[in-house]
Amino acid sequence: MTYIAKPKLHHPSLTKNRVGFTRRDYEGKISTLCAGCGHDSISAAIIQACWELDIEPHRVAKLSGIGCSSKTPDYFLGNSHGFNTVHGRMPSVLTGAYLANRELIYLGVSGDGDSASIGLGQFAHVMRRGVNMTYIVENNGVYGLTKGQFSATADKGSKSKRGQVNNDAPIDLVTLALVMGATFVGRGFSGDKTQLVPLIKSALAHQGAAVIDVLSPCLAFNNHTGSTKSYDYVREHNEAVNRLDFWPPREEITADYGEGEVTDVRQHDGSVVRLRKLHADYDPTDRIRAMSYIQEHAARGEVVTGLLYVDVDSRDLHRQLGTVEQPLNTLGAGQLCPGTTALQKINASLR
Amino acid sequence: MKPTDIAAPDYFHKVVDCQWACPAHTPVPEYIRLIAAGRYSDAYMLNWVSNVFPGILGRTCDRPCEPACRRARVEDETADGQSRREPVAICRLKRVAADYKQDIRGRLPTPAAQKNGRRVACIGAGPASLTVARDLAPLGYEVVIYDGDARAGGMMRTQIPKFRLPEEVIDEETGYVLGLGVDFRGGQYVHSLRDLLAEGYDAVFVGCGAPRGQDLDIPGRQQAAKHIHLGIDWLANVAFGHTTSIGKRVIVLGGGNTAMDCCRSARRLGGEDVKVIVRSGFEQMKASPWEKEDAMHEGIPILNNLVPKAFTHNGGRLTGVTFSKVRSVYDDKGRRSLLPTGEPDAHFPCDVVLVAVGQENAFPWIERDIGIEFDKWGLPKLDAATMQSTLPNVFFGGDAAFGPKNIIWAVAHGHDAAVSIDRLLNGEDIAARPDPMTTLISQKMGIHAWRYDNAISDDRRLRVPLRDTSAALKNIRIEVELGFDPQLAFKEAQRCLNCDVQTVFAPKLCIECDACMDICPMDCISFTCNGEEEELRPRLRAPALNASQALYVSETLKTGRVMIKDEDVCLHCGLCAERCPTGAWDMQKFLLQMTHAGPACRSASVPADQQPTA
């Protein structure tokens, strides 16, 4: 880890966004992760995305579980709300927070251990309930904090740093999310921010359960020959199905494109995700075909990245439950606890 | 762009902005670190080797290093809400080394045990000549310095007031040079270069300065001559104690550093109403900003945009000066002209005028038929690199070479001339100049431990404590600046960014994980596809708009991209190297020292019998 604080000085050209903050204002403490960790790149991408989206830091709640990945919320958005939950229980704490206050932007940060092992059930349920959140899995295929055992996302046949071969079938969180009903599913790579930043922006704007599986090489335990989560392997086998550009609702779309395969996806909040197709036959609005496409490529050892699925008609949990519009903390005691008469009325209606 | 050749000595030298800007290329960050470590004697010696007069320059240098300092480009309001951007107080830190050093006489070179039989004459005992003597005498040259004054120092002694530069400091540092076995002939003014050359010197160095003050030939000059003095002559008279008082109302004409010395001296000799009146605007004045500040701090007003028109007088007594009011207008080539505003003339009453409107070179003692050619401005025709005149064994330096500059330039000229003389008298081509000596050494001590303090101080530039003005004005020999004490010096030294600790990139080790780019507080590092420089600069992670600062371009990396680092605002904090998992970044100290006269400056082909025995 680094001992000195990151200097406060910044580049003279550093600009402020619409809400008056520089990109540096979205940083957190200096990272204590190993040098070169992919997770740090993801933190940088989250910082960049939040700055570009003009998000006020105090409107964000960042929640995480346990693990290297779950430490990272300390290293970005230092002025946002944070909750470091029990191992694998980030989704349920986040769901509770979301039910109490739907006005915050919910960012869940987790890892392959936290989400695919101890928290697999939680992962599945938060997807199927349609909690309006961005769920980022920092996926490195190993348990880094306990010195590099295979995690549940390690590919069958891949080798550990000491040469052992993994015999267990991997859990593919992207496929699982599609099965469980997530309405925004993407996969990125920590070493490619030009793809990752617009992916995170689009996910934050998505109204519903959005999951991004980010391949994030572990420099200490999983960046060797034989690993399928190393910088070299991912770079060689990365099959990006599309490139994204993102425009928030109020902004005019300015970029020019030549003739070609471009699809615009307008989300609920009015934001537009423009997809430049790299694989002509890929349709990110078809859940079933997306699943088979991902599986076909995985069988060939390829890693499909990009925006894999989006449902523009997503419904979130509050709409399903018909809950009150305002955050609970803005309601008075009388509204929150209407008393015996109101309870009797409800009971009577159910008899 | 092509990959950067970091082996070329100039590349990393330019990154050390202060050292690059210093005419003598003093290794500034290195001595600042020594000061922070309390190693004042070591800091002094490092300076002494480069610039010969650390104590004098620490008080009087024109500090070309400070406007160049990177610190002034990176400070902003993030630290304390103030938008001040100020360089490290490099000059005044140098004085700390001189003030707190121990006795360093044992560390100086000793007079040559054996002379090499070559004789070199230096004319004038100012900084340029003393530098030539310092470089050549220990090598065995018989160096003779002539000066019209009895004591060495030249303008440092005659023109700089003692309240800025105490006599002891001049005595000490000129003494170090004269103690190297130099034959100093004080009080021997050279009246004829022809006669001097006839004495059989192998080489002659002319370091006589720019000794003539420019006069102001306007009506009334002759009639009131008794009360109008040329600034540098008057300062010399004050320095030697010939002048000890002045009238109550004094006008100083001119906007350079000499004018500032004149007005502040006048305040101390009885001048109560002292004004500086300048043709140009305040910003355009030639005086250094800090010298203007010091004058104003002593209650001296500076009046601008006034052109002297006439001296008014009554029966041989000066009564004042009339000025016409002007404004500065610049044409599209940036040339200034002063246009009258049309307002009525202004008259300022006074008893004395000091004219400090410029200095000129004067070589009445150089015969025009001995082979030394002069240009139309009366300056000798010289080779700017070798300082050689059209007479091959005569060299010039200091103000005598290219007109009035300053002490540090004189020192640089002296070093260059000494190299030329040494090579010439060893039968070598003097146009071939020696490369500087450089080392590049990793500063890594542990995973995140370095041989230098890489934390960045948020402190603002510290002010040098001053003596109370009323006490300072009472005595012209009392030094105004008290200098930093060790605590202040440490704090100020910590502001230095250690720009000589270079970020060295090894492309073969890079795995392109982005860690360095993400951590860099100044967004200096980009990984991108290569291109032409003009096209690359604006599209880097942060635009690299300062074209005077280099881009460090790597060889092509695995993904086909290149690493590009904009050197402009790098803090040299080393975080890129700390966050690099493969050691592709390393912090390496680049130490550059100029090659001075001696065996190292000569080509390898020097016959053994001509090399001095150690």
Image (spheres, coloured by chain):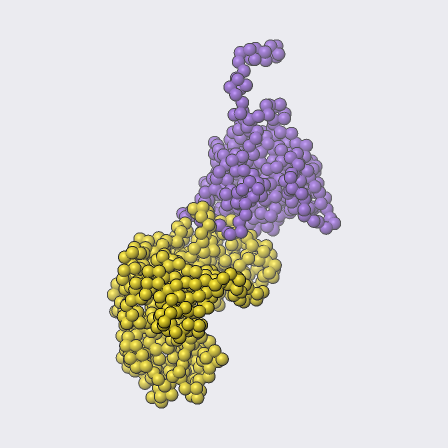
Outermost residue toward the front? B315
Residue A116, by quadrant, is: top right
- The percent coordinates of residue B542 (x first, y second) are 55, 53
Is B453 positioned to the left or the right of A19 in the image? left
- The percent coordinates of residue A99 (x first, y second) are 56, 26
Q: Is residue B346 above or below residue B575?
A: below
| Point 32% across, 65% down: residue | B247
| Point 52% across, 38% down: residue | A57
Pick the residue in front: B499 or A252. Answer: A252
Pick the residue in front: B550 or B362. Answer: B362
Pick the residue in front: A167 or B163. Answer: B163
Quadrant position of the C terminus of chain A in the picture: top right
Outermost residue toward the right? A259
Residue A276 visible within the image: yes
Is A233 positioned to the left or the right of B97 in the image? right
Residue B432 visible within the image: no
Pick the residue in front: A60 or B120. Answer: B120
- The percent coordinates of residue A92 (x first, y second) are 53, 29
- The percent coordinates of residue A336 (x first, y second) are 53, 19
Chain coloured yellow in this rendering? B
Q: Tell how many labels.
A: 0
| Point 67% across, 43% down: residue | A252
Q: Colour of chain A?
A: purple
| Point 37% across, 77% down: residue | B208
